[in-house]
Amino acid sequence: ELSNLKIGLVVGDHAPTGMLCYQEFMSGPSLVTGSIKSFEESQPHPDDVTFVVFTSGSTGEPKGVMHTSNTLAAINATYVKEYGVTSDDVIFMPAPLGLSVGLMHGVRLAVFTGAKLQLQERWEAEKSIEVISRERATLTVIVPTMLQDIATNPRLLDRESLPSLRLVWVGGTFVSPSLVQVAHDNLPHTLISPGWGMSEGIGSCCGSDTPLSKQLTTDGRPFPGTELKIVSLVGDELPFGEEGELAMRGPQLFAGYLHRPDLNDAAFLPDGFLRTGDLARMDPDGYIKMTGRVKDLIIRGGLNISPVEVEEMLAGDARITSIALSGMPDERLGERICAFVVLKRGTKLSLEDLAARAEASGLAKQKWPERLEILAELPMTPTGKVQRYALKQMITEKLIKESRVS
């Protein structure tokens, strides 16, 4: 079954027939016939691709992101510089190791710093609190839904607000100001650090010197050694406060997409900045605020509408557990806005309710949802991001069926 297998190495002093002990292979003459290079001859270069991790697929088919030893070391060194991660830390990592967050910020960070790594096979809020408390975990990297599960858990106060937990880096999708405030109140000894990153490289964070007002309203400033700027569709840099595509440059950037030279050519600007595909604004202090994805823009009658902007204003309704907007095809305007909402148990919500909240928030009427779909849950990627393309497909198919019925 393994016809291409040329050598099998075993850790330890005894190896089964047909295999070699690792130390014997490294130090003694090879017992394997054929042209097998020595370690010195085949030692990998720090810029060689060392692993491939696939994107979450929030906008479609996942892409293979290639990283080298140097890019990974730059990512880990950033955590050491910004957060002071050392061998005294205990990292709690609930994300699967097959995802970039689990591997880069879990396994690799632990190996790089000598920190202890505590894994969780699947996400369970109650169990997470138990593990963090028992193992005295000091830091974790999670998505907003996980932070909400922990910060609002009624058992949290029974654990004395988890005093060992000094850092929670939260990102991957929209982080609401209300969630950051609740987490800040219920975890008073913990730095709640909203940030932004992607499989291709990490970009921004809220550090220990970040004012609470910025923690509540931004996704932080660039990590040490990282450059960020906002560009137009043609790549020109935009002034502070103007929405555009976020571009990133730094030593932590990936080495390219696996078997996709076409994507590599289109991904970078001439000056080496990566076009991230994310929409953002930057303030004069260098803090960025993510506003959506370029591919997620709803184009209604020629007006570009960022779903995140509308979602932020509507998410404050106490009946709403989660909300996501998508464009739905319209013959006259091109697209109209559909709101997909998950409600808290026992509550009701109407399109008129959403319109009233949008009006009270001062949202332009062109950005109000024009259809409401109540779901039991939103379609999500393994990393906790909403699959907006799935929502768009869902409402498109539903509209087609309705037109047939009528």
Image: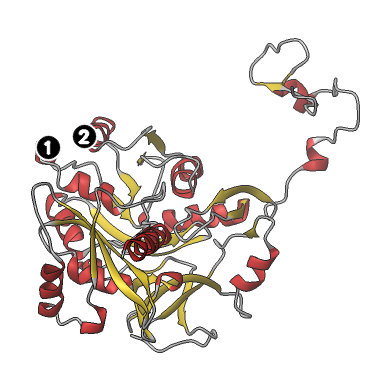
Instruction: Say which residue appears at 41% left-offset and 40% top-offset.
Output: 87
Mark 1 residue crowding within 10 angstroms, few (<14) / some (14–19) / many (20+): some
Q: Nearer the viewer, residue 199 or 404?
A: 404
Q: Which three-letter amino acid code belongs to the residue tagged 2? A: Glu
Total residue callouts: 2
Quadrant housing the N terminus: top right
Quadrant housing the C terminus: bottom left
Q: Nearer the viewer, residue 161 or 112?
A: 161
User: Residue 82: horizontal and vertical position, in percent?
Assistant: 39, 59
Whether residue 154 is visible to the viewer of this picture, yes or no, is yes
Which label was assigned to residue 29? none
Alpha carbon distance from label 2 to label 1 = 8 Å
The image quarter containing residue 117 is top left
Q: Residue furthest right?
A: 34
Does 292 sit above or below residue 80?
Answer: below
* Element on which disc 1 rests: loop
Q: Give yes or no for contact between labels 2 and 1 (Cβ–Cβ under 8 Å).
A: yes
User: Residue 123: horizontal and vertical position, in percent?
Assistant: 31, 38
Which label was assigned to residue 155? 1
Q: Which residue is mark 2?
A: 126
Does 13 sit above or below residue 72?
Answer: above
Instruction: Say which residue appears at 85% left-offset and 20% top-offset.
Output: 31
Q: Nearer the viewer, residue 133 or 295?
A: 295
